[in-house]
Amino acid sequence: MIFMGMMARMRSMAPWFILTVGGLFIIFMVLSDSRVLDFARTQSQNVGSVDGEEISYQDFSNTVERLRKQQEQAGQQISEEQMDYFRDQVWEMMVTQKLLDKKIKEYGIIVGMVLADRLGIVVGDTIAVLSPTGADVAAMQLGMPLIRKFHVVGIYESNNKDYDSYYAFVDLESAQALFLTGSKIDGYEIR
């Protein structure tokens, strides 16, 4: 009798079982034919994102390897114990660079006419500026000088060729980042 009761119960549940298995089959078919799996694969290939811009595992590992080789060429070996710390430094550098690259689009540089002619640049070009302060820090850290790109938003001409040849102007925040002064101001000139 117990067996008969179980059989009756199984028969009453059969439609639900068939619907559940059929529904799972349909969901599986839809997912396997859609871009959902591509999305999941893409997510696993990214290390993280900065302001919505993805950083792929490939880019991260290439950067780690390139900087590790630079360290070795400079005579500094990175041990396995130091690799986690080194990877953290590279990650922080990549995040900082991504954030700064976004800021570059917001801020620009104004250069003197003589300097612009010498460099062959016009308004709208992008130039790279090397920080002399950053070179010292780079030698002690990752071996990369501090370089910032700026969008040329203007070219000025004064009555002083020395100014036009050597001076460029950026916003305070960009200058502080370039010269690694934090939020401090270590000098200013009024002309």
Image (cartoon, rainbow, N blue to C red):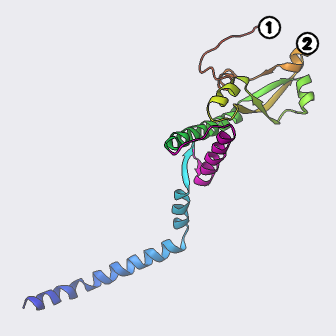
Mark 2 sits on what residue?
Answer: 160
Predominant secondary structure in magenta?
A: helix
At a point 33% along the width and 78% down the height, the residue shown is 20
Rendered position, 156 above or below 98: above
Image quadrant where residue 92 sits = top right
Region of the chain picked out in magenta, as a range:
52-80
Q: Is residue 57 magenta?
A: yes
At a point 61% along the width and 54% down the height, the residue shown is 58
Q: Is residue 86 magenta?
A: no
Rendered position, 41 above or below 135: below
Type of amino acid at the residue the image marks with label 2: Asn
Question: Residue 154, percent across and down?
Answer: 83, 27
At a point 75% along the width and 29% down the height, the residue shown is 130
Type of amino acid at the residue the image marks with label 1: Arg
Q: Residues within 10 Å of mark 1 (few under 14, many from 20)?
A: few
Q: How many numbered markers are drawn? A: 2
Q: Which mark is residue 191?
A: 1
Question: Residue 190, percent across and down?
Answer: 76, 8
Alpha carbon distance from label 2 to label 1: 12 Å
Instruction: Classify the position of the N terminus by image quarter.
Output: bottom left
Q: Is residue 5 left or right of residue 78?
A: left
Classify mark 2: helix, strand or loop. Answer: loop
Instruction: Classify the position of the C terminus by image quarter.
Output: top right
Rendered position, 117 above or below 10: above
Q: Earlier in the sequence, mark 2 or mark 1?
A: 2
Image quadrant where residue 78 sits = top right
Camera-side residue of 97 and 4:
97
Q: Which mark is residue 122?
A: none
